[in-house]
Amino acid sequence: MTATVNFNITELPENEVWFANAAAWNNYWQNIEADVDFTAITTTVYVPVPYNTAYQPIANAIQQADGSTVVQVFPTMDMFTSLRAQLTALDTAVQTMRTELKNAGLITNAQA
Amino acid sequence: MPTFKQKSFVGGMNLLVDETEIPDNAYRWMINGRQRLGTPQPIKSHVLQSDLPAGLKQGIVSLGDILIAFVAGSAYYRVEGNTGWIQVADFSMSSTAPRLWSLAVPSSKFNLERRANEDSNARSAIKIPVNTKIAGTPAGILVQDGLSQPQLILYEPVGQFLYSRVTKTYAQWNNDGTSANSREYVPIGKFMMIQNDILFIVAPDGRSVYRSISGRPLDFMVNVDVEGKKLASEAIGGAASVSFAFDYDEITALQPVNIPNAFLYGTQSQVRLVSMNFERTIFGEPLFDISAKIEAGVVNEDSVVELLGDIAFVDYENVKTFNAVRQLRIEGDNSIFSLQLSSLVDGIRQTAPRAVLWDNYGLFDINTKWGRVMAVFDTLLDVWVALDITELGYVKQFATVITESTKSLYAINTQNELYKLFSGERTTAQIMTRAWNDDDVEAEIKTELVRCIFDAGETDGTLRVREYMNNEMTQSDSRTLDGKTSGVEYPVIPPVIPHTKQLTNNNAMAFDQGRCGTKVQLHIQWDNDAKLHEIQIRVNSTAGQAAIEQQNKVLAGTTL
């Protein structure tokens, strides 16, 4: 990662003496302001893998001996597959980001 | 062999004329020294008061022998000579306001009810019914941050400690109250002034001035009805209803002057001398007339100081003076006071200057070509004597603490440090002398011997002398300055061995390795409490139509 730092330093006027003693030198640098521009780290673009909300669970209606009906709801394989794809994409994106942050020097460790 | 001498330095700094034209008793400049009696001596260093709690240093104020410091919204105090800071109980103001302003206010003198005239004319005399005594207001230190309700620091005489309470607002001013503090109303504001028993407060926006009732510094209920009661709201009857201003500019200074019933009203572009008019009143309180107007601005309220009857202030270009008694119209840049400093500050804009009168010296913390310095004006010698360049840096505020036997100067700076000034070991002083040359313009000089004579100090020190020939440093030498033995204390019991250390440091240095030139100047630097008594320079003088430097260049074949 790179940054550009610009110090706003008071211009030294013409004079026969610029810094008469050490204190003058220290005072000159007091309250100096700086502008820092950080150059953004180049990262890959994360393309989201959304969960398919069209998938619906299966509802099994089981008729009991006493004539009542018990409904049991089960997620389908398609729902699980879609959710897993989204999670895998997120996991990959997080690891990629951590690797890029580590390569840029912002963090010490990415992942094992 | 001519010998140049200088035996006195009372003439002060001279930065205007050529070095050779500087008077015999003056010098070019001095850093970190003083010479009230004509013998320059290094100043004492400033001592950091590191035991003050850390945080944003918002202000300091003294009350007799007590120093109060405002740190990040809290207040701490210390009795001079004691160690450790005590927090002022119940004090809490803005922790982020860059500045807290404070002023010691006396107790009230006027404790009778006031009622507007039945003719409902605010310009009519106020009525003061007999037998209508009301509660007075106490003495204390009023503190403002421009944001929140001001607080009053009070002294508890039994427990002997300082504590604080919030002052009362417009809503809390009691129409029928006679108990303590029931007729108290202090508006929020910034810096303050007391003149003629009236407390003046600059409004938070800096564009107008509030004023209290005469004789009641903590009671701003000037505007009352025929029954002596306040009006329905602060917007109608509050301090702003009787405030005053003279133009749109932000008020940068409000300061009493040394003539009765008058004060200085400063903005960034004008200084006004304002008098109170007791013939023209509003609710019985005097209105204001402009006695004099000066085309000079004041940078801030901390850069105005009285110097032996004159008011000195810092505007954006220079330090200027104003004589209130003579109602002198300041000529600013053309006055002698400003002229001597003009070469230091020419082209430099003043930001956040500070000023204080200390030990008959006017100390001006200002921007100069030398960076941030404290320019020192000796009011007794009437000359600028030195530039103090120390670790103090940019001063935020000064405060003077006075005990029965001592007087101490404190300052806070923009690095959030508190220093006790001129109280430590001796610093290193530097003095650049005037330049000497032979009266014969054809003559050139070459130094042979330099002698610096000091009245010995109490401690040893180091002297360094640098020779400048034609403004170029050519040679230097150093010596030890021996301290003198201190006297034998009473009772003197034999055997008493007489001291062998000299009371005068007479340092002769052979400066014969330099070159010829037209004018010679010395830079003298030393770091103990010895006093420079006399300088002597013995030179060889040779006359010729062409300068030796010119001859050398011709012989060397270089172009002139």
Image (cartoon, rainbow, N blue to C red):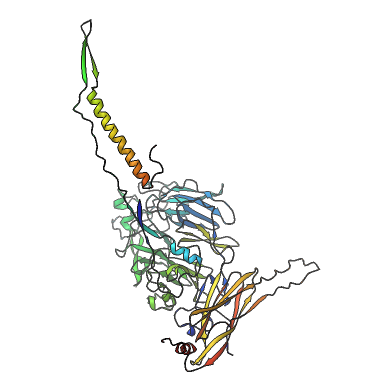
Q: Which of B213/B541 is in front?
A: B541
Q: Which residue lies furthest to the left in this view?
A: A54
Which of the 4 quarters of the picture holds residue B8? bottom right
Q: Can you see residue B133?
A: no
Which of the 4 quarters of the picture holds residue B4? bottom right
Q: Which of B556/B366 is in front?
A: B556
A19 relative to A60 in the view: left or right: right
Q: Which of B330/B168 is in front?
A: B330
x%, y% of residue B140? 48, 53
x%, y% of residue B300? 39, 64
Q: Can you see residue B76?
A: yes
Q: In this view, does B559 lie above or below B241?
A: below
Q: In this view, does A45 lie above or below B52?
A: above
x%, y% of residue B489? 73, 66
Q: From the image, which quarter does the C terminus of chain B lie in? A: bottom left
Q: Which of B335/A67 is in front?
A: A67
The residue lying at 65 percent from left, 69 percent from top is B458
